[in-house]
Amino acid sequence: MINILMVDDHDIVREGIRRIIEDETEIKITKEASTGEEAIELLMKNNFDLVLLDISMPGKNGIQTLKEIKQINKDLPVLMLSMHAEEQYAMRSIKAGASGYLTKDTASNKLVAAIKQISKGRKYISQEVAELLVSDIYHNEDKALHAYLSDREFEIFQLIVIGNTSKKIAADLSISDKTVSTYRSRILKKMNMKTISELIRYAINQKLID
């Protein structure tokens, strides 16, 4: 039996995942968490064979939670689930220790196979992610500017370019307005840009937002 910890802040998503695997006799969701903090607490008290982990959560996001999971148990397989396309978070997830990355719109068709593959100690990587990995290894000079942002910087970058105010970003991430301003300045400097409008145009051109 593959005992799973499922981590997602949306009840409807957790319900959808339960339905996908409810007929599988080899897979069981034994615990659920809606935040990264809850997930870490459950991991400290229980044994799991695999973690299904959402990327976008309030407070401690999926990447941060993944890194902490790996500090607690480096061998515990983690499958990242995300509404974001592979080019946005897959590379960051794999580099942080994830065993696979799956977009939520493909979960109904691929989730069970991914869980079974990862539970055997293998990676689950789509063709798109494989191409990103190859590009990262052999074509470092072709990296997009946003690839040089840290995970936290990239998260805040995404929130900025979709129109969130500093106050809202601070509230969503449980950080101060001043910290958001510091990150914004750092992002602009790293990407050699001066205004938020430039960031937005860049994000649109890179298809990071619609």
Image (tube, rainbow, N blue to C red):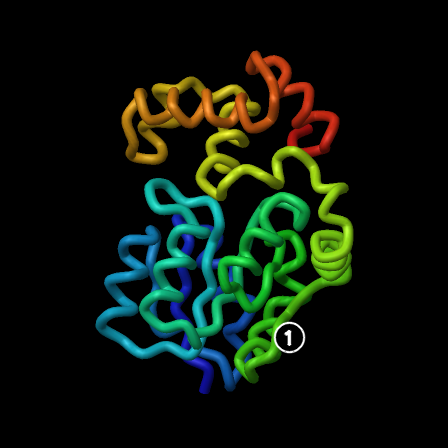
Looking at the rendered structure, the number of numbered marks drawn on it comes to: 1
Q: For this rendering, which residue is in front, 26 or 44? A: 44
**183 above or below 41?**
above
The relative height of residue 120 versus residue 90 in the rendered view (above or below) is below
Q: Observer-nearest residue: 207 or 116?
A: 207
Is 129 in front, or is 115? 129
Amino acid, disc 1: Ala
Q: Is residue 177 above or below residue 45?
A: above
Q: Residue at x 47, y 45 (%)?
A: 56
Left or right of residue 208, residue 42 in this image: left
- Tell me where residue 71 sits by quadrant: bottom left
Q: Secondary structure at mark 1?
A: helix
Residue under numbered circle 1: 113
The quarter of the picture where the C terminus appears is: top right
Residue 4 position by quadrant: bottom left
Residue 94, position in %: x, y? 57, 60
User: Does residue 162 appear left or right of residue 152 in this picture?
Assistant: right
Point out the image quarter for the N terminus: bottom left
**Residue that extends furthest to the front in the rendered view of this protein:** 141
Q: Residue at x 66, y 50 (%)?
A: 86
Q: Position of residue 92 (x, y in %)?
A: 56, 51
* Residue 6 screen position, x and y as percent: 41, 64
Query: Is the residue marked by circle 1 packed among few (<14), some (14-19), or many (20+) residues within 10 Å?
Result: few
The percent coordinates of residue 98 (x first, y second) are 52, 64
Residue occupying image coordinates x 22% and y 72%: 45
The image quarter containing residue 57 is: top left
